[in-house]
Amino acid sequence: MRVRVDFDLCQGHGACKSEAPAVFGVDEREHLVIVLQEEPPEAERENVKRAVKYCPTFALKLED
Amino acid sequence: MSGPRAAAPRYPFPATPDGWYGLCLASELARGEVKALSYFGRELVAFRGEDGGCRVFDAHCPHLGAHLGVGGRVEGDGIRCPFHGWRFDGAGCLVEVPRLARTPKGIRAHAHPVQERNGFVHVWVHAQGAPPDYDVKDFLGEPSQWLPWNANTYRVRVHVQDMTENILDRAHFLHVHDMQPPDVERFEVRFEGPYMVVEQLLKVTALSARGVEVLSRTTNCGPGISVAEVHQGDLHMINYITQTPIDDEMTDVRLHFTMKRLGDDAATKAVAELNDRITQQQFRQDVPIWEHRAYLEKPRLTEVDGPVAQYRRWYRQFYSDWQGAAAAGEGR
């Protein structure tokens, strides 16, 4: 499982951080997501899936 | 003492994105006819030469500034200025000055590229003067099968980018237009170079309270042309919307409707009238929102909204004259 971010679309709303705080952080100054774990463990799958779903700018992707 | 503060511009980007725009129906410009037009913050003259070709020039004669569209006359493929009789050919080159033996070289009226398609005259505008790099698609095929275009014109205080954002703003359909959500969700947006295609199932309740689901496909050909097609069995309808900036504030919006003739003329007429009523009603519902909304750089979107950020990214390709377009796309 691998997390991909389209930084061109990300606006740093932080929805992903709320869904999967172990995987995503937010750079408050740059208004951009920080990926804490590019290849998160299987246990985070459901959280990451929700982060992808609820990203307001559709900037996240989950690849297997 | 400080004077009144200048209002901040409503949008960060230029009023006229690069691309093709509809000017008028091809049938509104007969052979030999001349029209004075105001679009893109400039004055234009459109005319159809005796050869049948349509031309669009900047309006003012390079000699002493007369408006070629006010009293100018078509001659051959070109036009003669009403002031001193200077004659320009179809490409805008000066070819005759009355009583002058040798016509000065290199004097021209600025000619804009024109494409006639689907029964419309389209003009190409580009901030850097670059030539057209895409085409307006052909939506009709064989024109004789279709009703003549029925047109309704509006002037709206909105930027063309804001207007077409509504096509993929799926949440507004239910709220502004009182539409029912379809039983099966289908909403697909494809960005293909200068084209954006949105396919969606819509539930139309105008015919029966239970609603009829129709698949609608809207194709944007650049910033100026949005074409919504509904094709279901014998029913094939097109709403062809041209949105053309007049100046920094106002946009000229024309809603055109056609459909393939059904076997029964009365049924064709009934469907056309119903569509006209629904389309205009829906358009008028959008107008007050458009005219008063603010452009937010960072809209607070949610997952029930359409891909607004992707749409805005796609749109940046039409701003060759905007530093912000480049800045927004780099270094991330």
Image (cartoon, rainbow, N blue to C red):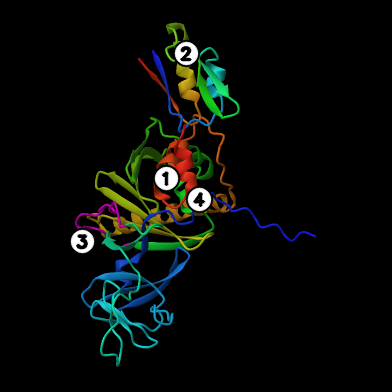
Q: Earlier in the sequence, mark 3 or mark 1?
A: 3
Q: Magenta span: helix, strand or loop, mainly? A: loop
Callout 1: residue from which chain?
A: B
Q: Earlier in the sequence, mark 4 or mark 3?
A: 4
Q: Are marks 4 and 3 in contact (CB under 8 Å)?
A: no
Magenta region, residue range: B131-149
Residue B235 locus on image (x, y percent): 28, 48
Mark 1 and mark 2, same subunit?
no
Q: CA distance from mark 3 to mark 1?
A: 34 Å
Q: CA distance from mark 2 to mark 3?
A: 61 Å
> Looking at the image, which is closer to me, B177 or B63?
B63
Q: Local crowd at mark 2 within 10 Å, few (<14), some, or many (≥20)? A: few
Residue A22 locus on image (x, y percent): 53, 12
Q: Is residue B130 magenta?
A: no
Horizontal side, residue B6 vs residue B172: left or right: right
Q: Local crowd at mark 4 within 10 Å, few (<14), some, or many (≥20)? A: some
Read off the residue under disc 2: A37
